[in-house]
Image: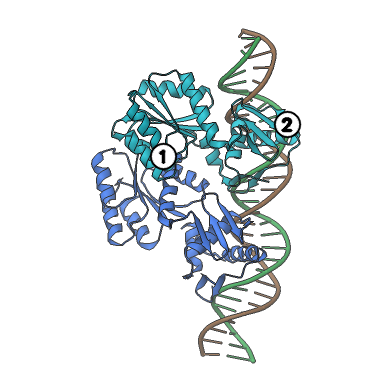
Chain colours: A blue, B cyan, C brown, D green
Amino acid sequence: MKILIIEDEKDLSESIVAYLKSEEYVCEVASTYNKALEKTELYDYDCILLDITIPGGSGLDILRELKANNKLDGVLIISARNSLDDKITGLTLGADDYLSKPFHLSELSARVAAIIRRKNFDGNDLLKFQNISIDTRAKLVSVNNKPLELTRKEYELLLYFVTNKKRVISKNAIAEHLWGDNMEGNNDFIYTHIKNLRKKLSDAGDADYIKSVYGMGYKFSE
Amino acid sequence: MKILIIEDEKDLSESIVAYLKSEEYVCEVASTYNKALEKTELYDYDCILLDITIPGGSGLDILRELKANNKLDGVLIISARNSLDDKITGLTLGADDYLSKPFHLSELSARVAAIIRRKNFDGNDLLKFQNISIDTRAKLVSVNNKPLELTRKEYELLLYFVTNKKRVISKNAIAEHLWGDNMEGNNDFIYTHIKNLRKKLSDAGDADYIKSVYGMGYKFSE
DNA sequence: TAACTTCTTTATAAATTCTTCAACTTCTCT
DNA sequence: AGAGAAGTTGAAGAATTTATAAAGAAGTTA
């Protein structure tokens, strides 16, 4: 899961990143208005943390921009100003939630989790594909009702596949989503993770749902 | 065990917190209607103390909201109004118990303990997992019917595991549940508690039910 | 206050996973 | 068919995470 943190106070953004990383999120930071717009234009995020007061422009304008581009899904506003106005404006513009500084990182993390849950929620708590089911709350994967032990990267990879099934996903998109933007150059090691995940799934008695699409990437389907 | 106290009178909430803390509960306070709703949405509590008259809305609406979200389990209403109406409405809406102000903290504590017991124990008084049984009333643990002496943190840790068995629990989640939300930064000392608990359990002749899930946390299961 | 217990910190060792690398296979295009 | 690019695989070293022991800090009890 990938999160964009739009925040100029370096101390704060760093401690947010540290905490969210320990919860297995991939984080990117944008410290100015322009950088933030660039990022949101180029990439998709599962959740965006938005500080209203950033250099170069207003966070509320970023919200408007996101709305215009139909990317306004999963925004959590964080702001020092505890004014009701900001909160109302933000939520009216379509933000999902609002958190005033200072806050506990565990609370932030819980809110992020709630936003992502809400976003992917389709009635039941389990993500399913054929005989695979993923309990994201318990972080448990099972195949044919038998538990399957996956490493972090394998788990995140499978999650990405299941939430993007039936469409072709490029190697770069995978790198982008699982490792973030600090991953320049070679990303061939993804092959290794694909291989390991395939092996575990087939050992569990699965057909190979991870189809290679030569020159394009992978597609998760029957 | 984690308790949410929904109460706007600061003096009262503080003395409740002080008392319950001394009984090893982890406490959080919400002083308004909105804060209360937020907290209940974000976190799970073992017990919720609910004052009916809080600023920003009615405690009864919080009850309705909890009911709608299937989180209505373990609510103790505390209220100055000693009206029969409120009591009936509250209990009809599904609260577990009702306590009129003023009350003795020891009585509150006893009722909280009773609610938590009722919540976790299906029929009999003991919380059990395999050959481990926990008497939460007496705070006694036994393995194969022999008493096992645990320190407070070890006891709370085991309790957390037993009540959350078969799901992966992150180190952060443990920190939050046993130490509260003011526990940022390093929490590696949890390793030590895990080690000590494991040792005591294995000395008592137990298999190691505390499975490490590399990079994700721990899982309590056979 | 002293004796004792428990909790937290620190340092080091062990275990697991991630990434790199190289040899090999498959695919596409001319 | 052959060349080159893309993908697969297994085995290794690097990096990260967890386990353990031992000592210091904090809290309890008498």
Q: Say which amino acid is labelled 1.
A: Thr
Q: Is residue A35 above or below residue A174?
A: above
Disc 1 packing (10 Å; few <14; some 14–19; many ≥20)? some
Q: Say which amino acid is labelled 2.
A: Asn
Q: Is residue A10 visible?
A: no
- Kindly report the distance in space between the C-alpha atoms of the residues bearing marks 1 and 2: 37 Å
Residue C21 image position (x, y, % from top left): 65, 65
Chain of the residue under label 1:
B
Disc 2 packing (10 Å; few <14; some 14–19; many ≥20)? few
Query: For the residue labelled by badge 1, is the local secondary structure a helix, a strand or a loop?
Result: helix
Q: Is residue B114 visible?
A: yes
Mark number displayed over residue A40:
none
Q: Nearer the viewer, residue A55 or A102?
A: A102
Q: Is residue B97 above or below residue A75?
A: above
- Residue assigned mark 2: B145
Q: Residue at x 73, y 41 (%)?
A: B207
Residue B111 image position (x, y, % from top left): 49, 26
Locate residue A102 relative to residue A151 in the image: left or right: left
- Residue assigned mark 1: B40
Q: Residue at x 38, y 62 (%)?
A: A42
* Labels 1, 2: one chain: yes
Residue C3 image position (x, y, % from top left): 69, 12
Chain of the residue under label 2:
B
Q: Nearer the viewer, residue B82 or B156?
A: B82
Query: For the residue labelled by badge 2, is the local secondary structure a helix, a strand or a loop?
Result: loop
Q: Residue at x 47, y 40 (%)?
A: B44
Q: Residue at x 23, y 42 (%)?
A: A85
Whichever of callouts 1 and 2 sits on the residue coming sooner in the sequence is: 1
Q: Is residue B135 above or below residue A95?
A: above
The reply to whether dot 1 and dot 2 touch (C-beta < 8 Å) is no
Q: Quadrant of residue A186?
A: bottom right
